[in-house]
Image (spheres, rainbow, N blue to C red):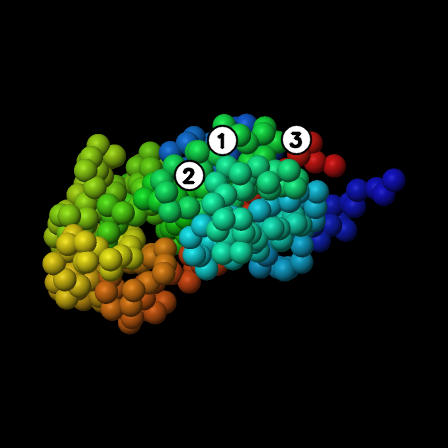
């Protein structure tokens, strides 16, 4: 039997790896694992959020030092099933799983039996029969992941990578992780969400996460793009930018879905630009230290100017992308790690 290395001979990377594994056995991590799935941020208790953020922090420190596989989930198989196009989410889940040592199946929907009429439940059943341990699904229909649960065995986890207008939990978590990384706790911070909030799963997952954590969340959009019942979610709504941005610590811009113009929900993109587009001048209404987030993809020149998007003194967009990997590593590790790690 190989003896455990002494503290004197342990490298910084080995120490980080040990801390990373141990983070999967905190009370919050165990509670999260008992839930089996990650469907939305509203399902997460405070200690579960804390555990996910702590584990993501360690994951980021590890991947800064080494890009080698950690070989922690070598007996696990993860399937990504994306019924909608994705660059950031799918790529980062793939990289996160492989970094943990898991095998990955990336299902190509365009060449799968879905094109022949196979249901999402039948697709999931096929993957389960092949031995997957986690299904990461994105779908255009709200509630699509919940639809899988009655047929999912207890040893398989489902992670929602975005379902319709409903939820995108790992995006909400990585947004939180990014804001905490640059500004500490979000408690008492003013966070303004600007754009097409009505049709945004990102907005909903952020709101469901940030409000319980004590953030002061404001939402700004054209009246037709503010969802009903938003005040009941603990959010202060605005149709004018000025009060939404005033003294904001963070601003989350959302993609203006241009099809809304064809649906008559906005008068024109030009009108949207005049009233709601973010630029350097309008960001001056926020705090001098304000930082900008955007989940991507960006419609440059519509919801924000290219100059603002690319200004690294304000924009956290690239940091959000890079933070997607450690946050998704955290979710996968906490869900899939064995109860006792050998």
Q: Residue at x 33, y 37 (%)?
A: 208
Q: Are marks 3 and 2 in contact (CB under 8 Å)?
A: no
Q: Is residue 179 above or below residue 64?
A: above
- Please, what secondary structure does the residue beneath circle 2 have? helix
| Residue 302 figure quarter | bottom left
Residue 106 percent across, percent down from the top left: 57, 53
Eye-nearest disc, 3 or 1: 1
Residue 263 percent across, percent down from the top left: 18, 54
* Image-based side of 187 in relation to 324, left or right: left
Checking the image for residue 76, the label placed there is none
* Image-based side of 309 in relation to 160, left or right: left
- Please, what secondary structure does the residue beneath circle 3 have? loop
Q: Are marks 3 and 1 in contact (CB under 8 Å)?
A: no
* Residue situated furthest right in the rendering: 1
Spatial CA span between label 3 and label 2 = 29 Å
The mark that comes first in sequence, 3 or 1, is 1
Residue 232 percent across, percent down from the top left: 21, 32
**Which quadrant holds the C terminus?**
top right
Local packing at callout 1 (Cα closer than 10 Å; few below 14, some 14-19, many 20+) is some
Residue identified by numbered label 1: 149
Which residue occupies the foreground of this view, 261 or 100? Answer: 261
Residue identified by numbered label 2: 144
Q: Residue at x 33, y 56 (%)?
A: 293
Q: Residue at x 15, y 54 (%)?
A: 264
* Image-based side of 2 in relation to 117, left or right: right
The mark that comes first in sequence, 1 or 2, is 2
Spatial CA span between label 1 and label 2 = 10 Å
Counting labels gives: 3
Local packing at callout 2 (Cα closer than 10 Å; few below 14, some 14-19, many 20+) is many
Which residue occupies the foreground of this view, 129 or 97? Answer: 129
The mark that comes first in sequence, 3 or 2, is 2
Residue identified by numbered label 3: 339
């Amino acid at each position: 039997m190989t003896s455990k290395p002494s503290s004197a001979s342990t490298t910084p990377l080995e120490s980080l790896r040990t801390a990373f594994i141990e983070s999967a056995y905190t009370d919050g991590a165990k509670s999260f694992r008992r839930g089996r799935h990650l469907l939305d941020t509203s399902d997460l208790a405070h200690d579960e959020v804390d555990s996910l953020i702590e584990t993501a922090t360690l994951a980021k420190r590890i991947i800064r030092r080494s890009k080698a596989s950690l070989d922690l989930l070598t007996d696990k198989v993860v399937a990504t099933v994306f019924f909608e196009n994705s660059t950031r989410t799918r790529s980062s889940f793939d990289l996160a799983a492989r970094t943990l040592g898991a095998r990955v199946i990336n299902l190509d929907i365009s060449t799968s039996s879905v094109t022949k009429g196979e249901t999402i439940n039948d697709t999931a059943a096929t993957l389960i029969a092949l031995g997957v341990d986690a299904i990461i699904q994105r779908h255009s229909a709200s509630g699509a992941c919940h639809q899988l649960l009655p047929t999912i065995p207890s040893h398989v986890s489902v992670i929602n990578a975005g379902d319709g207008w409903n939820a995108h939990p790992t995006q909400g978590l990585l947004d939180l992780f990014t804001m905490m990384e640059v500004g500490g706790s979000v408690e008492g911070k003013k966070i303004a969400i600007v754009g097409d909030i009505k049709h945004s799963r990102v907005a909903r997952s952020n709101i469901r996460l940030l409000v319980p954590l004590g953030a002061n969340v404001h939402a700004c959009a054209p009246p037709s793009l503010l969802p009903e019942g938003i005040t009941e979610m603990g959010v202060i709504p605005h149709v004018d930018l000025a009060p939404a941005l005033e003294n904001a610590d963070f601003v989350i811009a959302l993609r203006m879905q241009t099809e809304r113009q064809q649906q008559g929900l906005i008068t024109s993109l030009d009108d949207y630009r005049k009233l709601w587009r973010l630029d350097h001048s309008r960001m001056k209404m926020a705090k001098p230290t304000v930082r900008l987030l955007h989940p991507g993809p960006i419609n440059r020149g519509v919801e924000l100017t290219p100059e603002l998007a690319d200004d690294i003194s304000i924009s956290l967009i690239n940091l959000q992308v890079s933070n997607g990997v450690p946050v998704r590593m955290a979710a996968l590790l906490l869900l899939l790690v064995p109860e006792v790690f050998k």
